Image: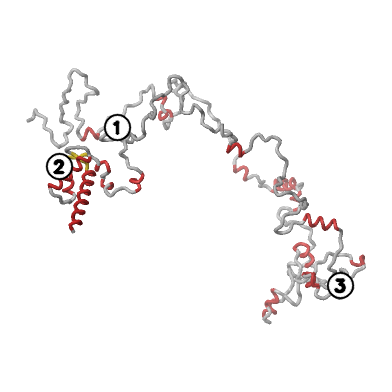
């Protein structure tokens, strides 16, 4: 048993050796590479040979070798050039300059150097206007003791008002209204009017007119034109002028002005008057100037202007004008191939690539109203297929129709004569013959009754 090869379902180990299969045709050289190891074991399927490495003379063309980390990027044209001996490049000599500490310590440390720096900066306007260590001089004349002995602001006696329950007067004083133009001693209100437009409630705007020069007193003078009569219901008459009996209803003006207004004014719902009325034009009048060239119109292009003689068929219509190509056949003959090929027999199994209609395809009525048996794969072709007597007997028996052998033979013989056959008929002819037999039987039965 050791010299024979036993085929089992157990995977072979790598130590076992499978004898290669003998070639079928010894005189033909086998294709491929002969393998001496076991290629069907699990170990050989999971062990892979190492990928071949790139040759040394081709490494300089690969991007992975060209950009290898830690190495200088060299062009493949100079990759094999020897490097020069000795030091390569120029050594960089560091020249220390001014450091950050020198810039931070730029301010002089000695008193003499600080005095010299201040004398040098005295020429600047900022040093004259605002010296170092002092406030900005704006030229204000502050009274003596203001801010020290005398506080800023106006004394409101808030504590006394709070004791009296009038703290709101400290926040919104009413006994001395600040900002009123009627207070001649208040000098802050005109400033706020000029800068912010802060007019008091009910305050009249004062534009500082010189009324003495005009000889008017705005306190007593009334502007406008005085009416000679007393006016009553002035607003009512202004809104409804027709109720003013004193007003004149007739107004005489120039006739040209009225005609211009009647022509230029556009009334609501009316066509603008252009002064073209009253010309008494006929109903079929056509405005505009006729075209000089009346060679054609859109109607002529769409309908055409051919004469009845030009619309007749050509004399050579349906006839060949080339000699030797004329179909001069007998009268009534139709040339060509019909679309529905009922003249040839349909193939038993029609290919899907064959689009020819052999007259066995359903019509529109059958597509809209298919028969009850169409869902089961039975079409009209099956009913018209010729069958033997035994096949018809099996179908009738399977359908559940009980029929005597003598009656079946008579109906089958009648159906075979109808199909002009001796030993076969179609199922459709058999059912028609059965209907005739039932009609004759019912008629005899009814006559007897």
Q: Earlier in the sequence, mark 1 or mark 3?
A: 3
Callout 1 secondary element:
loop
Disc 1 crowd rating (10 Å Cα; few below 14, some 14-19, many 20+) is few
User: Where's residue 372, x and y in %?
Assistant: 28, 49
Callout 2 secondary element:
helix
Label pair 1/2, CB-CB below 8 angstroms: no
Disc 3 crowd rating (10 Å Cα; few below 14, some 14-19, many 20+) is few
**Left or right: 163, with 379 as reference point:** right
Label pair 2/3, CB-CB below 8 angstroms: no
Label pair 1/3, CB-CB below 8 angstroms: no
The CA span between labels 1 and 2 is 29 Å
Q: Earlier in the sequence, mark 2 or mark 3?
A: 3
Displayed quadrant of residue 355: top left
Q: Residue 411 — which label?
A: none
Residue located at (79% from left, 58% from top): 139
Foreground of the two, 184 or 302: 302
**Left or right: 378, with 239 as reference point:** left
**Left or right: 104, with 127 as reference point:** left
Callout 3 secondary element:
loop
The count of marks equals: 3
On screen, residue 123 above or below 242:
above
Quadrant where the image shows the C terminus: bottom left
The CA span between labels 1 and 3 is 126 Å
Q: Earlier in the sequence, mark 1 or mark 2?
A: 1
Residue located at (75% from left, 66% from top): 198
On screen, residue 206 above or below 99:
below
Q: Residue 390 — which label?
A: 2
Displayed quadrant of residue 382: top left
- The residue beneath circle 3 is 219
Q: Kindly report which numbered mark, 2 or 3, lies closer to the viewer in this rendering.
A: 2
- The residue beneath circle 1 is 344
């Amino acid at each position: 048993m050791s010299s024979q090869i036993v085929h089992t379902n157990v995977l072979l180990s790598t130590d076992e050796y499978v004898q290669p299969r003998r070639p079928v045709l010894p005189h033909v050289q086998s294709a491929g590479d002969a393998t001496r190891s076991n290629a069907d074991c699990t170990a050989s399927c999971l062990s892979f040979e190492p990928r071949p490495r790139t040759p040394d003379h081709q490494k300089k063309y690969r991007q992975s070798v060209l950009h290898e980390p830690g190495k200088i990027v060299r062009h493949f044209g100079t990759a094999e050039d020897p490097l020069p001996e000795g030091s390569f490049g120029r050594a960089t000599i560091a020249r220390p300059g001014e450091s950050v500490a020198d810039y931070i310590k730029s301010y002089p440390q000695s008193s003499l150097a600080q005095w010299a720096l201040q004398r040098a900066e005295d020429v600047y306007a900022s040093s004259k206007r605002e010296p170092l260590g002092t406030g900005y001089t704006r030229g204000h004349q502050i009274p003596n003791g203001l801010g020290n002995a005398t506080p800023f602001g106006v004394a409101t006696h808030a504590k006394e008002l709070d004791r009296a329950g009038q703290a709101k007067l400290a926040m919104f004083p009413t006994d001395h209204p600040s900002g009123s133009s009627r207070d001649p001693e208040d000098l802050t209100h005109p400033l706020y009017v000029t800068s912010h437009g802060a007019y008091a409630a009910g305050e009249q705007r004062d534009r500082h007119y010189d009324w003495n020069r005009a000889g008017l007193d705005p306190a007593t003078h009334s502007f406008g034109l005085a009416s000679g009569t007393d006016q009553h219901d002035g607003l009512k008459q202004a809104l409804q002028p027709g109720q003013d009996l004193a007003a004149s209803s007739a107004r005489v003006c120039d006739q040209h002005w009225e005609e211009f207004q009647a022509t230029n004014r556009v009334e609501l719902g009316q066509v603008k008057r252009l002064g073209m009325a009253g010309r008494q034009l006929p109903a079929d009048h056509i405005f505009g100037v006729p075209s000089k060239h009346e060679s054609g119109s859109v109607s002529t292009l769409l309908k055409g202007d051919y004469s009845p003689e030009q619309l007749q068929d050509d004399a050579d219509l349906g006839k060949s004008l080339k000699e030797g190509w004329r179909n001069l056949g007998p009268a009534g003959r139709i040339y060509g191939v019909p679309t529905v090929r009922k003249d040839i027999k349909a193939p038993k199994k029609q290919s899907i690539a064959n689009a020819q209609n052999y007259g066995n395809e359903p019509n529109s009525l059958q597509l809209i109203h298919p028969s009850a048996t169409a869902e089961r794969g039975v079409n009209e072709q099956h009913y018209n297929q010729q069958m033997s007597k035994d096949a018809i007997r099996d179908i009738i028996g399977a359908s559940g129709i009980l029929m005597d052998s003598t009656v079946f033979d008579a109906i089958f013989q009648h159906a075979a004569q109808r199909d002009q056959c001796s030993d076969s008929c179609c199922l459709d002819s058999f059912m028609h013959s059965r209907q005739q037999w039932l009609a004759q039987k019912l008629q005899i039965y009814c006559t007897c009754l």
